Amino acid sequence: MLVAYDTRLLSEKLSQEAVDVFTHFGFPTVLADRDLPAPALAWAVRQRQASLGVMFTASHNPPEYNGVKLYTKDGVLAGKDFTDQVEREVDALTSLPEPFFLRRDELVSVEPLGEAYLAALEAHVDWDAVRRLPGKVVVDPLFGTSREFLDRVLLAHGVPTRVLHATKDPYFGGYAPECTPANLSSLREAVREEGAILGLATDGDADRFGVVDGSCRVFAPNPVLAALVDYIVGSRRFSPGSGGVGRTIATTRLIDRVAAARGLDLVATPVGFPSLGPLLLSGKVCVGVEESAGLGVSVHLPERDGIFACLLLAEMVGACGLPLRSILRNLFARYGTLLSRRVQLPLREESSRALQLLQGRQFREFGGLAVTHVEREGGLLLELAGGAWVLWRLSGTEPKVRLYAEAPSTSLLRALVRDAKKTWRQAEEEVRHV
């Protein structure tokens, strides 16, 4: 067993408890010698042929949250079939008296679990392209686990780099370690001060990323993901035989257009990277993305990796010789414009029933556009004429209702978001008065 933890308050304590449990039952267990990026643990599980990787983290959620991620022997986030079995065991154990677990020291070792991962970054990035960046890079780990990983490899290759928030702070400076525009204000200011070409950020456990370009603009994940997919399948060591492109249903349909133009199959999955990991592992897709800034590449790791995504961004900008904003303009010119937005609404007592109510309805049109396809698994997705769509779903990690929309124009996107909010409020109101 491999056990690791992030920088939040009780993660290291929880990891010590896990070591006690595993060794009590006779499992040799390796504990990380420091807080660790989640993709580094996934890589260590594969490299060491471990049975399981356990990561105590709440990822991008606020500091008062905590949780656990499980990685199977292939370095893939455990899917629902696996976690359902774990939950059944937990349910059975809760009926027993509180157990006492005695650590067996002879089964425990504390080791650096990130070195093999750092070596993989050396092998999987075109460092000649990265070194062609025409300016400084600013890195912001948001007080999370990527410090001394992302900055370390950039500095090792002679890339001028400034680092922000590189200390261990369990409160993440007082905000959630998520790569939102508000949380990246310090990164924007540092990019302005340095005249930097790029600002690169990772979330709390470094499996997601954020980016600021030289214009000090924080770019939304969707178009950046589409540009990365286009770059990866078009100019790296991939061919149509290397697998298709995977995306979750909440991710921009620009991905579909890129895949079609490149002659690659497109695989759409439910929300959540555990649906994409097995596809990357099997080779059915060579790259998988989710709208919340998650990217995985099969030749590197069948799991999202924010550090690798940041390095690929630097590589892409260096290889293209253009600022990121110009790369995105070229992307829209080639594939057409699609603009997306995600809105978070509070989860109320009636929200679950409101979603069920909407799922039970038949939609022929929405926002004045014909409905061309409907999906009801895990939420309600309405695909609309002209490439637009809307999606309602309940968050699996926070008490939030998430509303997504995409459209080819700003005016239509605003209208769809407005109508989607109105539809949701009406559904909740109807539930309240039943």
Image (cartoon, grey):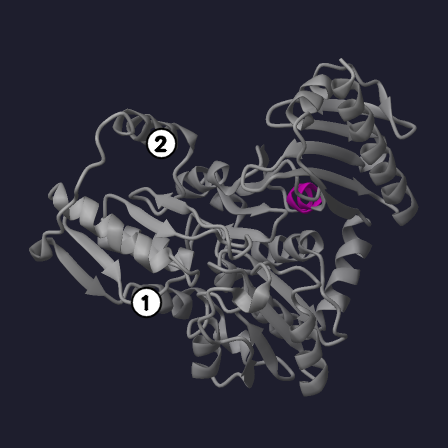
Bounds of the magenta span? 255-261
Identify which amino acid the numbered label 2 is placed on: Phe
Q: How far apart are marks 1 and 2 (CA)?
A: 27 Å
Circle 2: is it few (<14), some (14-19), or many (20+) Cα within 10 Å? Answer: few
Q: Which of marks 1 and 2 is nearer the N terminus?
A: 1
Q: Which of 348/158 is in front?
A: 348
Q: Which image quarter: residue 100?
A: top left
Residue 322 vertical position relative to residue 109 in the rendered view, above or below: below
Q: Which image quarter: residue 326?
A: bottom right
What number is the disc on residue 190? none
* Residue farthest toward the left in the current orientation of the protein: 106
Mark 1 or mark 2, whichever is nearer to me: 1
Q: Is residue 41 magenta?
A: no
Coordinates of residue 353 in the picture (x, y in percent): 67, 20
What number is the disc on residue 82? 2
What number is the disc on residue 34? 1
